[in-house]
Amino acid sequence: MKIISLFITLIASASAFAPLNPIAKTTTSLNSFEGELGDQDPLGYWDPVGFSAGGDPEKFERFRYVELKHGRVCMLAFLGEVVTRAGIHLPGNIDYSGTKFDSIPNGWAAIGALPKEGVLQLLAFVGFLELFIMKDVTGEGEFPGDFRNGWIDYGWDSFDAEEQESKRRIELSNGRAAMIGVLIILVADQVGFDLPLLSGI
């Protein structure tokens, strides 16, 4: 019952943010990026802090690259949370002292439970990927986040321009949702809130 009451309250309070009258659009430096990939309903082009003020295309591409990278990491993190909370773990031991993969807890507690050598290996591996693999090494990238490097394609070149744009929009939206999802999971885990939807899978 509390959840239903909370849901009704949220819906009612959302009406406070609906515009009463149409607002005349003015041209600013932020408008220069309207219509770019990621300018999607329901928010449209959304930059509340003004990061893209000034209309610098290089700065915008850098932010898009960072957004994609964070979204990809968070999609993997969210999937990892869902899989491990469902009780699916790698078989065997994580170290030579006999610590099993399935003995590592979920969420923040996993960081303290991992052997220090394992954490160092993870950091070294991520650093290696960041410096040598997950970037446009050959300069052939068609857009920010294009890391094919003339090596792996997954049929990308067989898609028409409309399908390519659709897939890029989907990845961007999924990355944004994953960033929010991972943040919610980590905050809920830190404050001790049980996540029955994830643990009950």
Image (cartoon, grey):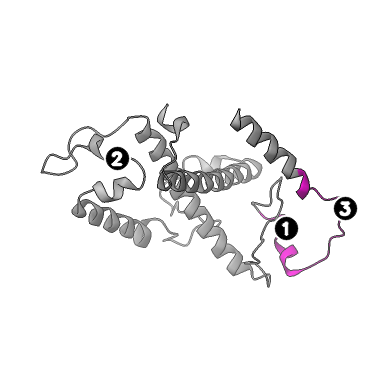
Residue 61 appears in which quarter of the rendering? bottom right
Q: Residue at x 55, y 44 (%)?
A: 177
The mark that comes first in sequence, 2 or 3, is: 3
- Tag nearer the camera, 1 or 3: 3
Dot 3 crowding, Cα within 10 Å, few <14, some 14–19, many 20+: few
Q: Residue at x 31, y 46 (%)?
A: 109
Q: Which residues are magenta?
A: 15-36
In this image, 86 relative to 20: left or right? Answer: left
Is residue 146 in view from this perspective? Answer: no
Please state which amino acid type lies under the numbered disc 1.
Glu
Q: Residue 123 at what x, y percent from top left?
A: 29, 57
- Tag nearer the camera, 2 or 1: 2
Magenta stretch containing residue 35, yes or no?
yes
Q: Residue at x 36, y 62 (%)?
A: 131
How many numbered badges does the structure rendering display?
3
Please state which amino acid type lies under the numbered disc 3.
Pro
The disc label shown at residue 22, or none: 3
Dot 1 crowding, Cα within 10 Å, few <14, some 14–19, many 20+: some
Residue 137 appears in which quarter of the rendering? bottom left
Residue under label 1, please give it: 34
Identify whether 201 is placed above or below 150: above
Magenta stretch containing residue 137, yes or no?
no
Distance from disc 2 to disc 3, alpha carbons, whole Å, reads 51 Å
Distance from disc 1 to disc 3, alpha carbons, whole Å, reads 18 Å
Residue under label 2, please give it: 105
Give the quarter of the figure containing the N terminus: top right
Which secondary structure, mark 1? loop
Distance from disc 2 to disc 1, alpha carbons, whole Å, reads 44 Å
In this image, 21 relative to 42: left or right? Answer: right
Between residue 195 and residue 54, name the one nearer to us.
Answer: 195
Q: Residue 188 at what x, y percent from top left?
A: 46, 44
The mark that comes first in sequence, 1 or 3, is: 3
